[in-house]
Every structure is written in structure tokens, then in C-alpha cells.
Image (cartoon, grey):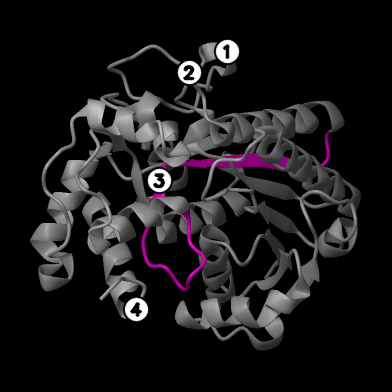
């Protein structure tokens, strides 16, 4: 079995990836910004069904500092670089997101090269694929790149695109570890604790009745367990070397479809979920006061789509349905008491 480093073990995708790596018998290391979080991460993994004991070790490393990365990577066969800044709010300066994302990716690539790691699997995003383009009917695929000159792009979209570009440039010019990139759409599925991704907040707010209505938006849905599975397939499969893989479960969903799924399947727990769509002008008015709403304005009414054909064909990946991912999210929020009563 291999020795594998997972950066960002306290995160949503990171913790699920560790659970699956341990289940397959690998020895796992993970980085956290502060070692005081070890107990918290172990509690997340226990919720996910893993009792790693000595099969998991922790290293302190920060995306914005050089310290700790060489020690964390030394002796590892593979690295999953999953850690990435993803703020709940909007940063005052976009470089607060862009620089840590880009420099963090390069720190991991440099340490992997120095340690003789076989392959780095980098978690990028659909954000690096499908933005800044004029509307198109064809689904986006792995040959597409977000156009940074396209205008109206959020700091998060820019940070993921720039960081992924930097990693590919490093792999091409500097050599060292092979590189494979996973580009997930909106990641849903069972939360293991309170530290979860921004996409989960959508389901939480719908269930809590915190949204007065449904914005006219569509986005991709994928279950976090399938994203973790794709990372692990990409780690060792020869066909994954030097490739990008979009991780999405079928066609994009509208927020109205997500709400309808919750209403149909979650019973009393979904009684607060709104059913009416909000006119775009209502959100545009709200955006004048709320920077978080302002971020979604460019997405209103846009139809996007992406295909998972490449991951299915090359790696035999078979994700759960979109509906199952949404319901697993809601069920876990109920089980962990993370909804308003």
C-alpha cells in the first residue's frame, strides 16, 4: 500500500478522501494549518466511518508559507492537493484568494518534485473550465478553460483558474511528479461536521427557509464521495497521467429543481423550503446591500452544462445521481442538528 499526503484534511473533500484512502489500506498523512485541529479532524473521520489510529499522521503546513511542506511530503508516493482558500464571504481584495491558491499549488508541486513523488492529484474546479465564455449549447469539457479576459468573474473563479494554470506550467517546465487535475462542479453529499463547503450552504439555507425565494440559476451537482473516489482512481490509473477530469453527475440543475427534490423526498424537514422563483430584479436590488448576492448576479438566467464522459470512459467512474447527492446533504444536516428548529 502507498503512503499518501492529503492537503487540507479538515475540509469537505479532503476528509472524505482520507476516509476512502484509509478504507483501501493506504497510510495517510494530512496537512492542517494548526496541529490543534487534529482532534477535530479525527472526529470528522469517525463520523465518516473511519478509525485511523496510527494509519493517519498530521503535519502543520500553510498554503502561504514555505515551512512544513518538505517534511509533509517526504517519503510519500502520491499527493492529493485539495486544500484551497474558499471564503464564505467576499474578500476585499481578490489577491487575498488568488495568491494563496497559486502559491500553495506551487509549494506542493515543488515539494513533490523534491521528494520524488510519483503523481500529484490537484483539486481544481469547474470554475477553471466554464466561465468568461459567451453562451453555448454544447456542454463544457476538459479542453475548455475559463477566459480570464471574459469579465465579471468572481475572485474565486480567478483563483482556481490561475492556480491550475500555474500547476500545469510547473509540471511542463520543471518536470518532477506527474500531474492529474480534478475539476468538480458544486460539491454536495454527507457533511461530517460543521466545516463544510459553500455549496452545502445552499441546501442549508433552503431547508432553514432563509431564502425568500429561488434565484433563477443552474449549476452542476456531484456527491463528495464520488469526488473522493475520482481522486483515488486518478492517483494510480496510468490513463490519468497529465489529464484533467470534470467531476459532475449529469446535467446541471436549477435551484428550483433542487428545491423540488427536497420537497418531494425530505418530508416535514423540508417544510420551510421555498417554491417560488424570484424575479431577477429582486436579487439585483438585494445586491446593492449584500456583497454575497452581488456575486451571483452575473449567473442569473445563464444556462451552463458540463460532461463527465471522459472520467467515465477513461477511469470507469460511475457517480451517484444528482438527486441522491442533494438528499444525502439534507439528511446529514438533519442528523447532525445543523438546521434551525
The CA span between labels 4 and 3 is 23 Å
**Labelled pair 2, 4 in contact (Cβ < 8 Å):** no
Say which residue label 1 marks.
149
Q: Is residue 166 above or below residue 35?
A: above
Q: Residue at x 46, y 77 (%)?
A: 48
Residue 49 appearing in the image? no
Q: Which residue is mark 2?
A: 132
Q: Quick check: 302 left or right of 16?
A: left
Residue holding disc 4: 337
Cα distance between the residues tagged 1 and 2: 7 Å
Magenta segment includes 187:
yes
Q: Which residue is mark 3?
A: 186
Of the image marks 1 and 4, the number of the one nearer the N terminus: 1
Residue 288 vs 110, above or below: the answer is: above
Camera-side mark, 3 or 1: 1
> What residue range appears in magenta?
175-197
Amino acid at each position: 500500500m502507498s503512503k499518501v499526503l492529503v492537503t487540507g484534511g479538515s475540509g469537505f473533500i479532503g476528509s472524505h478522501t482520507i476516509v476512502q484512502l484509509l478504507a483501501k489500506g493506504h497510510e495517510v498523512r494530512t496537512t492542517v494549518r494548526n496541529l490543534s485541529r487534529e482532534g477535530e479532524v479525527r472526529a470528522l473521520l469517525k463520523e465518516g466511518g473511519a478509525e485511523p489510529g496510527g494509519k493517519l499522521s498530521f503535519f502543520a503546513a500553510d498554503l502561504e508559507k514555505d515551512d512544513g511542506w518538505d517534511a509533509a511530503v517526504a517519503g510519500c508516493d502520491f499527493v492529493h492537493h485539495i486544500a484551497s482558500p474558499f471564503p464564505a464571504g467576499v474578500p476585499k481584495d481578490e489577491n487575498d484568494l488568488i495568491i494563496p491558491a497559486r502559491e500553495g499549488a506551487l509549494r506542493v508541486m515543488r515539494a513533490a518534485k523534491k521528494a520524488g513523488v510519483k503523481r500529484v492529484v490537484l483539486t481544481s474546479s469547474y470554475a477553471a473550465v466554464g466561465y468568461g465564455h459567451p453562451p453555448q449549447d454544447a456542454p463544457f469539457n476538459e479542453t475548455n478553460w475559463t477566459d480570464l479576459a471574459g469579465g465579471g468573474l468572481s475572485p474565486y473563479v480567478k483563483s482556481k483558474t490561475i492556480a491550475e494554470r500555474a500547476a500545469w506550467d510547473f509540471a511542463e517546465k520543471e518536470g518532477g511528479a506527474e500531474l492529474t487535475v480534478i475539476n468538480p462542479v458544486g460539491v454536495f453529499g454527507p457533511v461530517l461536521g460543521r466545516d463544510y463547503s459553500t455549496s452545502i450552504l445552499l441546501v442549508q439555507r433552503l431547508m432553514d427557509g432563509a431564502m425568500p425565494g429561488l434565484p433563477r440559476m443552474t449549476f452542476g451537482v456531484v456527491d463528495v464521495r464520488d469526488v473522493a473516489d475520482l481522486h483515488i482512481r486518478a492517483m494510480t490509473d496510468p490513463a490519468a497521467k497529465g489529464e484533467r477530469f470534470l467531476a459532475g453527475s449529469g446535467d446541471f440543475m436549477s435551484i428550483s429543481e433542487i428545491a423540488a427534490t427536497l420537497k418531494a423526498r425530505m418530508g416535514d424537514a423540508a417544510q420551510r423550503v421555498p417554491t417560488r422563483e424570484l424575479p431577477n430584479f429582486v436579487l439585483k436590488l438585494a445586491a446593492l446591500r449584500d456583497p454575497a448576492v452581488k456575486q451571483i448576479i452575473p449567473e442569473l438566467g445563464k444556462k451552463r452544462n458540463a460532461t463527465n464522459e471522459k472520467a467515465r470512459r477513461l477511469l470507469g467512474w460511475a457517480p451517484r445521481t444528482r438527486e441522491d447527492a442533494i438528499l444525502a446533504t439534507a439528511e446529514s444536516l438533519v442528523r447532525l442538528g445543523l438546521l434551525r428548529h
